[in-house]
């Protein structure tokens, strides 16, 4: 099955203002885009940008606190459950305005007892999964590596799957970021094969450096061939930091454009 790649606008096309990155992604051949957060922009303005650029919004995150101050999610913090739930509602409003059918939740960094943080996380994910399901939106849950995000509550695929199991929800899926997984656990192909039915979205960047595929140690052509053979039909988000201009970072993608309809 041909692979579909989408551009992460929080990492790619940084040469442009955020609202101009949608058209830049379309010019580069991408049919889909993702990004961290839309909330700094009016929903109507974003919807107009989408209409004129012709790209699909594939995914963005639930509100995750003060990102610039180092917060990486609210879902595990007991004192902020109301704020988290309000954020889920806000995310759904944006998703509906932008035609986006996937949202991602970040657990966050506990500010106290990790056991209580885990219980809060499970409760919040149960709530978010139910509310997004009613809105026709699939909820993702992403582990982050603790080298880049020290103290993050859920750092590996196995931990994330245990959290998902604890919610007993059918609307909660693993967001598998190849970069984070390589840092924390490796064994990428076997993990993808074992858990692909539970993976709702994949993101890619090489290691070390979180740059474009082909810049580091990960053998992406092998992984892509395995995903094709396994019949993965979801999107693959290009969430990497280009070593130079974004337009010069797509050499790795050329073979897949030549053989598949990879951009959707």
Image (cartoon, rainbow, N blue to C red):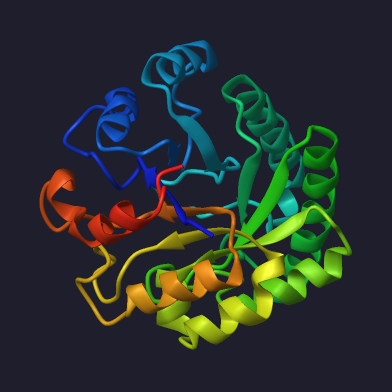
Please identify the quarter of the rendering in which residue 178 is found.
Answer: bottom left
Q: Nearer the viewer, residue 229 or 6?
A: 229
| Residue 146 in sight in this render | no
Using the image, determine if residue 161 lies above or below residue 92: below
> Where is residue 204 shown, x and y percent of the image?
40, 63
| Residue 118 in sight in this render | yes
**How many badges with numbers are in the image?**
0
Using the image, determine if residue 105 lies above or below residue 193: above
User: Which residue is at the far right?
Assistant: 168
Query: What residue is shown at x 56% (from left), y 86% (from top)?
Result: 190
Please identify the quarter of the rendering in which residue 200 is found.
Answer: bottom right
> Where is residue 217 shown, x and y percent of the image?
27, 82
Query: What residue is shown at x 32% (from left), y 80% (from top)?
Result: 219
> Where is residue 50 shown, x and y percent of the image?
45, 20
Pick the quarter of the image with the N terminus.
bottom right
Query: What residue is shown at x 58% (from left), y 82% (from top)?
Result: 191
Does 222 sit left or right of 116 as displayed? Answer: left
Does 81 sit left or right of 264 as displayed? Answer: right
Please identify the quarter of the rendering in which residue 87 is found.
Answer: top right
Using the image, determine if residue 33 lies above or below residue 165: above
> Where is residue 227 shown, x and y percent of the image?
52, 70
């Amino acid at each position: 099955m041909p692979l579909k790649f989408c551009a992460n606008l929080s990492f790619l096309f940084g040469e442009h203002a955020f609202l101009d990155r949608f058209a830049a992604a379309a010019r580069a051949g991408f049919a889909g885009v993702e990004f961290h957060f839309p909330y700094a922009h009016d929903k109507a303005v974003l919807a107009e940008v989408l209409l004129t650029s012709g790209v699909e919004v594939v995914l963005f995150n639930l509100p995750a606190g003060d990102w610039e101050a180092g917060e990486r999610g609210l879902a595990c913090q007991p004192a902020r459950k109301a704020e988290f739930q309000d954020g889920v509602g806000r995310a759904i409003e944006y998703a509906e305005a932008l035609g986006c059918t996937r949202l991602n939740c970040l657990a966050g960094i506990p500010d106290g007892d990790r056991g209580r943080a885990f219980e809060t996380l499970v409760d919040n994910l149960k709530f978010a999964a139910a509310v997004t399901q009613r809105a026709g939106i699939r909820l993702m849950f992403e582990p982050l590596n603790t080298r880049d995000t020290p103290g993050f509550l859920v750092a590996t695929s196995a931990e994330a799957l245990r959290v998902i199991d604890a919610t007993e929800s059918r609307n909660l899926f693993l967001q598998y970021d190849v970069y984070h997984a390589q840092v924390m656990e490796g064994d990428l192909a076997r993990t993808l094969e074992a858990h692909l039915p539970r993976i709702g979205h994949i993101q890619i960047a090489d290691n070390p450096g979180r740059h474009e595929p082909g810049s580091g140690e990960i053998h992406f052509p092998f992984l892509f061939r395995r995903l094709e053979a396994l019949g993965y039909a979801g999107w693959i988000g290009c969430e990497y930091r280009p070593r130079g201009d974004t337009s010069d970072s797509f050499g790795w993608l050329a073979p897949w454009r030549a053989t598949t309809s990879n951009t959707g």
